[in-house]
Amino acid sequence: MRYFYDTEFVENGTTIDLISIGIVADDGREYYAHLDDYDLDKAQAHEFVAANVLPYLEGVPRIPRAQVASEVAAFILPDSSPDLWGYFPSYDHVALAQLYGTMMDLPGHIPMRTNCVAQLGQMVGEFPDIPNAGLHDALSDAKWTRDVFNRIIELTK
């Protein structure tokens, strides 16, 4: 089963501090979490994050990291042959892995890589122009990534 996801984070070139994660599965399920342990002062001081990420999180409860890690592992079904997809997902995959510690600490059923929808579009010569009304909201971005993936597949048939 394919899982499309996005994360929002604050980073400084050395660390990636996960703020939120959104995941949508091919079977229609959705997951969204706002973590409780990121440095809010650092996020508020980061011009881009303060302007484009934090407004989506007003009023969204913050969830402990260990709970998010457990819920994500349960959401990505072990028997579903999970296939992860993101849009320029390099940092997203690191942020996902760090929910569990190091990359080697990922639960065994979660892939150690995330496929890139942008790369897929480049490889097949198709990248649809689909607007994203919720840009930088993790769940909205995950849905957009799914929609772009599905459109690329349709265009290549």
Image: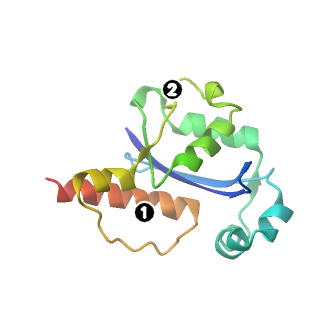
Residue at the spot 82% in from the left edge and 62% down from the top edge: 42
Is 111 above or below relative to 13?
Answer: above
Question: Tag 2: residue type?
Answer: His
Q: Is residue 106 left or right of residue 4?
A: right
Q: Is residue 68 left or right of residue 90?
A: right
The residue where tag 2 is placed is: 109
Lower sequence index among marks 1 and 2: 2
Is 73 above or below relative to 149?
Answer: above
Residue at the spot 47% in from the left edge and 41% down from the top edge: 114
Residue at the spot 59% in from the left edge and 49% down from the top edge: 91
Residue at the spot 33% in from the left edge and 55% down from the top edge: 149
Q: Residue furthest left?
A: 157
Q: Is residue 16 left or right of residue 131?
A: right
The residue where tag 1 is placed is: 144
Question: In the picture, which quadrant includes the N terminus?
Answer: top left
Query: In x, y percent, where is residue 155?
Result: 19, 59
Which element is circle 1 on? Answer: helix
Query: In x, y percent, where is residue 133?
Result: 48, 75
* Quarter of the figure with residue 108: top right
Question: Tag 1: residue type?
Answer: Trp
- Along the line of sight, the residue nearer the viewer: 97 or 123: 123
- Along the line of sight, the residue nearer the viewer: 118 or 155: 118
* Quarter of the figure with residue 129: bottom left
